[in-house]
């Protein structure tokens, strides 16, 4: 399916419009694929008969894959653009998701999670680099909307899987449905992605002359990445552990395990699509501060809730609070001038997606010792740090 004829793409404005559409669809696919895994997690834990610690260790394979793939993807994008990495990552996600609902052997599950994490991490880096380039060329704020599409995709993924499971369709067939839809989305998005990332001659020369020490991430970039790490770890906790938390702590039926993440995703989606208006009304610094406070209160409620419906309210607050922090941070990384934007965004993306992929593994291992509710309370304390770091990461 060709939405824009080849001759039409010669027009710069039409070409830019096509790139914006590709970026939105690709962000949707990232959320769609990764969130579809969330309702399948309780089934995987039961199938493998793992406790929290063992399952957390298994989830670490996904994080390791992402940590290896993300730095490499930043360099690959500089060489060949975003189109090929995005296409390969989407293909891998579509092929691997059904296997995650099938394996009952820990080794095969570990390999699939490693590759799944590699694909998700690589896609995240390539997309955020493309998003910054498209936002810069469009001369207007687009990052909240792009990340909003990721949240919308996550909502669509978790709702689709939950609905299929509710109608007694097996986890494997449910995952197949997601994969087919994902391939259709890829056919729309990939052909319109950026073929190359342009660097100015001055930027190329400065990068070539840099020493190894100068190439290292600047403290500002590390702080921005750390804030994203905390928020993504919170999102990963909602994705990977909210279903298990509902089923094991509150006795909710496994078929409805995706409810908590659904409420989280709905709030995050609404928050991100409202992000541009909220930034204009409150200002970037105030919005981030209010968001940090709101998400902290929400996660604290999750950890002390006496009934399962309070958990849903808590996750709704967490989703709303976290919704605009990451888009703001990625925009700040794109505005800074301390290092090249591609290198900065690759570093921030690596730290951010490490949070969503590695964090849940440690949550499981620690949760087995002290309980998930206690871990969630500790994570809410980390969210307070984003409030403190707001002043040190602000860039006009």
Image: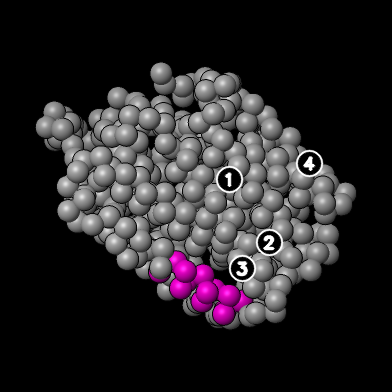
Which sits in the foreground, 243 or 94?
94
> Can you identify the residue that label 3 sits on?
161
| Residue pictured at 47% horizontal, 54% vertical | 28
> Can you identify the residue that label 4 sits on?
301
Q: Are marks 2 and 3 in contact (CB under 8 Å)?
A: yes
Please say whether residue 175 is one of the residues in the magenta stretch: yes
Give the foreground label among 2 and 3: 3
Q: Is residue 165 above or below residue 331?
A: below
Q: Is residue 151 left or right of residue 26?
A: right
Q: Which mark, by number, is residue 258?
A: 2
Per the model, the C-alpha gap separating discs 2 and 1 is: 16 Å
Q: Which mark, by number, is residue 96?
A: none
| Residue pictured at 58% horizontal, 45% vertical | 269
Q: Is residue 193 left or right of residue 232?
A: left
Q: Secondary structure at mark 1?
A: helix
The crowding category of the residue bearing disc 1, from other C-alpha atoms within 10 Å (few below 14, some 14 to 19, many at least 20), is many
């Amino acid at each position: 399916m060709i939405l824009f004829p080849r001759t039409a793409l010669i027009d710069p404005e039409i070409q830019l419009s096509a790139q914006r559409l590709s970026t939105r669809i690709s962000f949707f696919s990232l959320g769609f694929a990764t969130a579809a895994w969330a309702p399948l997690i309780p089934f995987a834990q039961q199938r493998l008969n793992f406790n929290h610690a063992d399952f957390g260790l298994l989830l670490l394979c996904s994080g390791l894959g992402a940590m290896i793939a993300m730095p490499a993807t930043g360099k690959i994008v500089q060489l060949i653009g975003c189109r090929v990495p995005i296409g390969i990552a989407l293909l891998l996600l579509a092929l691997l998701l059904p296997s995650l609902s099938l394996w009952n052997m820990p080794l095969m599950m570990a390999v699939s999670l490693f590759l799944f994490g590699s694909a998700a991490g690589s896609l995240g880096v390539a997309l955020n680099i493309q998003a910054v380039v498209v936002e810069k060329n469009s001369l207007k704020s687009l990052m909240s909307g792009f990340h909003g599409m990721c949240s919308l995709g996550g909502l669509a993924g978790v709702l689709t899987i939950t609905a299929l499971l509710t109608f007694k369709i097996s986890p494997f067939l449910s995952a197949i449905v997601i994969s087919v839809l994902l391939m259709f989305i890829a056919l729309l998005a990939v052909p319109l992605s950026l073929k190359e990332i342009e660097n100015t001659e001055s930027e190329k020369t400065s990068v070539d002359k840099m020493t190894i020490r100068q190439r290292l991430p600047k403290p500002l970039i590390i702080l921005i990445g750390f804030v994203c790490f905390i928020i993504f770890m919170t999102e990963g906790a909602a994705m990977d552990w909210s279903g298990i938390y509902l089923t094991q702590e509150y006795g909710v039926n496994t078929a409805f395990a995706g409810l908590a993440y659904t409420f989280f995703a709905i709030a995050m989606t609404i928050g991100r699509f409202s992000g541009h208006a909220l930034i204009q009304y409150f200002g970037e610094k105030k919005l981030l501060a209010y968001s940090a406070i709101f998400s902290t209160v929400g996660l604290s409620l999750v950890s002390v809730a006496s009934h399962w419906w309070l958990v849903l309210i808590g996750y709704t607050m967490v989703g709303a609070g976290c919704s605009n922090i990451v888009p703001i941070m990625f925009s700040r990384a794109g505005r800074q001038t301390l290092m090249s934007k591609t290198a900065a965004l690759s570093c921030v993306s690596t730290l951010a997606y490490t949070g969503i992929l590695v964090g849940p593994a440690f949550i499981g291992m620690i949760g087995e010792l002290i309980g998930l509710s206690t871990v969630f309370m500790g994570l809410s304390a980390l969210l307070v740090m984003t409030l403190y770091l707001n002043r040190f990461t602000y860039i006009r």
